[in-house]
Amino acid sequence: MTDLYKVDKYNENFDFFDDEIPENDRLYFSLGDQLNRARSILQSRSREQIEYIIESLDWMLRESSQLEFENSMRRLENEDSVFINRVKAFKLFSENYDIRNQPNLPNASWADYFATLSLVTILEAIHPENYEYSISHLDFPLEALEAVCIAEFHREIEQAESLSAKRKGKTGGKRKASKFADIINKVLTTYRDTPGLSDLSNRKAGYMLSEILKEEIESSPLDTEEPEHRIEIWLGKYKNGKLTISE
């Protein structure tokens, strides 16, 4: 089945922290407030960490697509219509994931994830030509607002230090977002420890690693994509110190 939800890759012609929506743009009044609120939540995060959140978020949304489809079909048995979007789907199934212990995203929080989802939605609204998939223009403001409101809710809970208490004893059976971190760590460790790989270009090394780790990749978040391309990007970030290996 085709993924109902996903997050397209970030295009670098918009800066998460500094760019503003042009005042003469029709989206200025409907998205400007959401943009400022999302940025406020993410002010302690680096650009590299936000890019990491987007990759992780994309994986979780794709995984949840089938679950959301099945849930909607069950609801339609008793309801005339069901209104869903990425934020509703992510909110519904986020409790299935444990986002802690990600080496490249220390102290990860759901406020980070929902604020980033709001930013992604705003990016899609401003630059729809950069994305192979985009929701309806009518949905952009509502989805961005929903996401940032949920992010603020999580931030308040975290600031009150009650979230950690609620999580105690409830991690069993959750699918770890660190599954995504694990495959990155496996790729980088194999790259570091395999003689000759560091002498190759990132593209060639990415292809070699996709073959060496074929079995692991088939059961990982990379199984629906072109893994060698994603690995090539990771290798570039690793060489530039933007990704690290967790020992």
Image (tube, helix red, strand yellow):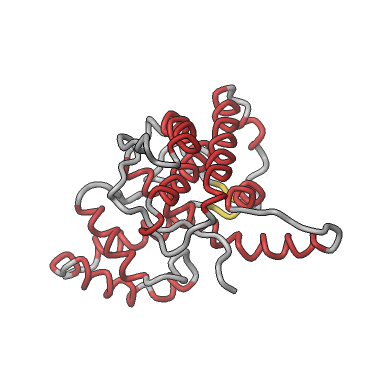
Q: Is residue 152 above or below residue 9?
A: above
Residue found farthest to the top: 160
Q: Which image quadrant for residue 32?
A: top left
With 146 as the anchor, is 81 left or right in this view? Answer: right
Residue sitting nearer the eye, 24 or 129: 24
Measured as percent of width and height from the top left, residue 235 is found at 25, 59
Name the residue located 58 percent from the left edge and 55 percent from the top edge. 175
- Most foreground residue, 27 or 108: 27
Q: How many marks?
A: 0
Does 76 sit left or right of 19 as displayed?
Answer: right
Please state which of residues 56 and 145 is positioned toward the viewer in this rendering.
145
Residue 28 percent coordinates (x, y): 43, 37
Frontmost residue, 148 versus 132: 132
Q: Residue at x 23, y 57 (%)?
A: 236
User: Residue 2, image x and y in percent?
Assistant: 56, 71
Q: Position of residue 31 (x, y in %)?
A: 47, 38
Residue at image coords 59%, 22%: 160
Q: Is residue 167 left or right of residue 112?
A: right
Residue in the image at 32% along x and 53% along y: 11
Q: Quadrant of the N terminus?
A: bottom right
Which residue is situated farthest in the left direction here? 199
